[in-house]
Amino acid sequence: MEEIQVNNMNLSKEADGDFVDDDEECPIKEVEMTVPKTDDPTTHVVTFRMWFLGITSCVLLSFVNQFFWYRTEPLTITSTAVQIAVVPIGHLMAKIITKRVFFEGTSWAFTLNPGPFNIKEHVLITIFANAGAGTVYATHILSSVKLYYKRPLNFLPALLIMATTQMLGFGWAGIFRKHLVEPAEMWWPGSLVQVSLFRALHEKETRPKGGTTRMQFFLVALIFSFAYYTFPGYLFQMLTSFSWLCWLAPKSIFVQQLGSGMRGLGIGALGFDWTTISSYLGSPLASPWFATANVAVGFILVMYVMTPLTYWYNVYNAKTFPIFSSGLFTLNGTRYNTEGVINTHFQLDHAAYNQYGQLHLSTFFAMSYGLGFASLGATVVHVFFFHGREVWNRSREALKKKIDVHTRLMKKYKQVPQWWFHIVLAVNMALILFICQYYLETLQLPWWGVLLAFALALGFTLPIGIISATTNQQPGLNIITEYIFGYLYPGYPVANMLFKVYGYISMTQALSFVYDFKLGHYMKIPPRAMFMAQMLGTFIAIIIYTITAWWLMDTVPNLCDISVLPDNSPWQCPMDRVFYDASVIWGLIGPKRIFGPLGVYSNVNWFFLGGAIAPILVWLAHKVFPKQKWIALIHMPVLLGATAMMPPASSVNYTSWLMLAFLSGYVVYRRWPHLWERYNYVLSGGLDAGTAFIAVLLFIALQSKDISVNWWGNNVDGCPLAACPTAKGVSAKGCPAML
């Protein structure tokens, strides 16, 4: 880029001849320190390398993440692993691919190798990978209908549900991108981590004396995790949950309730398995210490204070049920037969329900919903008291559309016309209305429910987006959507699931797209190239997700059926099981008969009030004792929502995660900050990638052919009595009778 001096100021020349002041400060200090204020518009972006590596990454991540979706210890491979892994491949392709110009001298001239592998290609590859990172939430609907309710569902409506869920969010993102991307005040803190990593990976690096480069370290971590996972994944599965306390009293229910990492409180339980550690809370290596501390306090209060007290004081007949379970029960502790209260139209049979009796939950499961209520109330109040003025000021500035240096640099590129997004939105809305009406008997969601879901998503995307973009917090609306529609339209489980997906998940997906837009904004990626990568990547991911899910449903015997599967089966589907249970609670039976006046758990609604009051108390304490800086670090939404993933997560997932997060975010970060900065995220990516590759290989080569190793070391957890009830007169399979 041409650099010149004008009026003693550093100015960068834009493609259209205008100049940008490189010394102009961004209003957000973190952005000013992290994001470069220069751009070279001549950099090649859409190249053969980008297409090949981007599409390959998208396909691989989509397959691997959907494969792990049904696992007992699900593992989500993030795009960070791809972001690191593609660097040497990109540079290798730049060296070995021919630089020949095809059709030279014509308007069709092109080359497969326009020059060195560059950072903009790398960003677009990562955008493709982001589409395959995580999973499609609508897969829960497929699993619930086919595997739990055992109802027929054809491939075409399943694919349409998956596609419209993802693409609808793209429409909402397009409507609000000018408000959530262009303003400097909408800075999306999480994106700065990726910007820093991109810069680090593309800076020239020399191997330190006696050390390794980042890429060498990544390969070492990948090879180590690839080799090591054969033990917890196949040869010595007890490493998944090493619950040694149970060995002290193998016939004691009480001791096993204390020590079991998968069915109890998990005292002393540890998982020496990366999937156990990162399954639900993500990589512990990416958690800042203040957040880890809040999660630790929340986990300790819930698991070691609230749960024992409510259980041993027999709150809501707690001793009739397991101490830790997401199951659905009758009053006498037997499993609730949901098929017995569903009529031929796949709706609640009121007469059968009244005869069979009310649905009961384990006390922990009921309290986990209460904590969800509290967390939602705490998030709203916390943002108002601690960030209200900041959000208001930044939102007001953002809506003025004040142009900063990054937005000005992006103006030289062809923008994506707004009508492109409007077309995507209109087509998806029309398609959703059509499939919900055409498959009404199966999907159950009436047209007015579809429109209400659209209204909720449209109404919440901007305010929730502003909160996310300025505070890095995203309030969850899943329980509220279930609650609202459960009252409006009880007795229809699939309708409730679809309403949640279209009303809440489409908004979440929209904010994910906006996040990617902001990342491209900071990295100066042409908007039309971003649009192409996001749309195509999402479409490819949807196809792979759906095909993989369908393949596993047809290939794995008794997938997700814990009544048939052995205890050490890797296919127990904890996330789908909780989603199914939620569809029974909120959809089939409805909140009125669970948490309302006709239900057992109406007092749980007081958690809404408690959650709203908690941040006010912290705020008042902070004002009264301003010198006590630690008070301001008490983050009640994080603390109250610490165990939001329990169930399906179990205590061993938390104890293992917290220990490694403490070692990384506190010990290494403070004592060896240079090592942490250089290798921390690289280690996380290497562990993700190596574990994913060997897990898929083990399944294809051995587990799919029922080749296993039977010995005591493959008895996962080894605490079977932890799931036993302790109320007198209540019997359960494999449990001693309590007299």
Image (cartoon, rainbow, N blue to C red):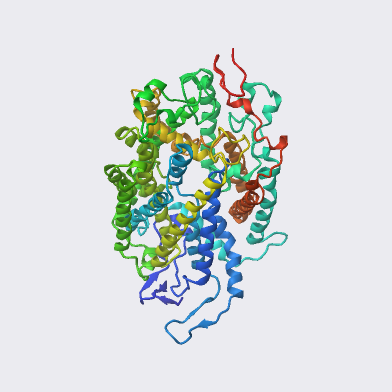
Give the quarter of the figure containing the C terminus.
top right
Q: Nearer the viewer, residue 409 or 230?
A: 230
Numbered disc total: 0
Q: Nearer the viewer, residue 108 or 371?
A: 108
Above or below: residue 105 compared with residue 300: below
Q: Farthest residue toward the bottom?
A: 105
Residue drawn at x 48%, y 85% as measured from the top left: 104
Above or below: residue 211 compared with residue 321: below
Residue 546 seen from this side: yes
Above or below: residue 506 compared with residue 493: below
Q: Give x and y (percent) for residue 537.
A: 45, 60
Q: Place residue 178 in its image quadrant.
A: bottom left
Side of 371 where 655 appears, left or right: right
Q: Give x and y (percent) for residue 592.
A: 34, 27
Residue drawn at x 40%, y 48% as measured from the top left: 508
Side of 233 where 563 appears, left or right: left
Q: Nearer the viewer, residue 497 or 89?
A: 497
Q: Give x and y (percent) for residue 244.
A: 69, 31
Q: Nearer the viewer, residue 88 or 523?
A: 88
Q: Farthest residue toward the top?
A: 739
Q: Give x and y (percent) for residue 459.
A: 29, 46
Residue 634 seen from this side: no
Above or below: residue 327 compared with residue 428: above
Q: Farthest residue toward the left?
A: 448
Residue drawn at x 37%, y 37% as measured from the top left: 482
